[in-house]
C-alpha cells in the first residue's frame, strides 16, 4: 500500500507543480489585457479552472499522501533532518499557492495592482522551492 500512496503522491506533486508554474505566467499575460475585455474574461476562466480543478485538488492530495506515508512509516521522522527541512519548504510552497489564489481573486474582481514583472519574479519561487525539495529528497544530506 505504501508504494501506491507514494506513486499517487508523486503524481499529485507533478500536477501541483505544473499549476504553480503556469498560473503566474497567466497572470503575466493577464496584466496586458484591459479589464472587462474578452481576453481578460478568458484569462479569468483559465485561472479559476486551473486553480480549482487542478491545483487545489493536487495540493490536497499531495499533502494527504505525504502525511499518510509518514503515518505508515513514522520512523521517517527520527533523525531525518532532511524530511523536516522538506516539510518546511512544502509549507512555504503552500504559502505560495495561497498567495496565487489571492492574486487570482484580485484579477477576477478587476483589482490587480501589480505589474507583470511582479508575477515574472513570483513565478521563480515555486521553481526554487521545487529544486531544493528534490535535492533534499534525493540526497538526504542530513
Image (tube, grey):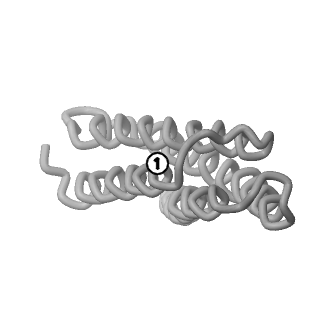
Depicted 81 relative to depicted 116: above or below = above
Depicted 102 relative to depicted 129: above or below = above
Quadrant for the N terminus, please: bottom right
Q: In this view, does 127 lie to the left or right of 30?
A: left
User: Under tag 1, what secondary structure?
Assistant: helix
Q: In x, y percent, where is residue 33?
A: 71, 61
Who's the residue at 42% across and 42% down the image? 90
Q: Is residue 20 left or right of residue 121?
A: right
**Residues packed near mark 1 inside 10 Å, few (<14), some (14 to 19) or many (20 plus):** few
How many numbered circles are shown?
1
Q: In x, y percent, where is residue 115?
A: 53, 49
Q: Is residue 16 left or right of residue 77?
A: right
Question: Closer to the camera, 54 or 80?
Answer: 54
Q: In x, y percent, where is residue 21?
A: 51, 61
Q: In which quarter of the image is residue 55?
A: bottom right
Residue found at the far left of this picture = 141
Residue beneath disc 1? 118
Who's the residue at 78% across and 45% down the image? 108
Who's the residue at 32% across and 41% down the image? 76
Q: Quadrant of residue 106?
A: top right
Amino acid at each position: 500500500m505504501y508504494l501506491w500512496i507514494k506513486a499517487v503522491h508523486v503524481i499529485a506533486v507533478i500536477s501541483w507543480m505544473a499549476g504553480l508554474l503556469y498560473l503566474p505566467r497567466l497572470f503575466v499575460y493577464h496584466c496586458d489585457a484591459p479589464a472587462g475585455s474578452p481576453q481578460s474574461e478568458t484569462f479569468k476562466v483559465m485561472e479559476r479552472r486551473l486553480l480549482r480543478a487542478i491545483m487545489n485538488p493536487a495540493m490536497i492530495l499531495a499533502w494527504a499522501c505525504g502525511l499518510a506515508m509518514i503515518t505508515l512509516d513514522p520512523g521517517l521522522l527520527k533523525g531525518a533532518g532532511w524530511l523536516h527541512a522538506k516539510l518546511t519548504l512544502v509549507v512555504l510552497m503552500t504559502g505560495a499557492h495561497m498567495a496565487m489564489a489571492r492574486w487570482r481573486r484580485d484579477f477576477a474582481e478587476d483589482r490587480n495592482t501589480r505589474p507583470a514583472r511582479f508575477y515574472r519574479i513570483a513565478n521563480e519561487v515555486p521553481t526554487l522551492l521545487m529544486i531544493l525539495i528534490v535535492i533534499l529528497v534525493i540526497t538526504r544530506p542530513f
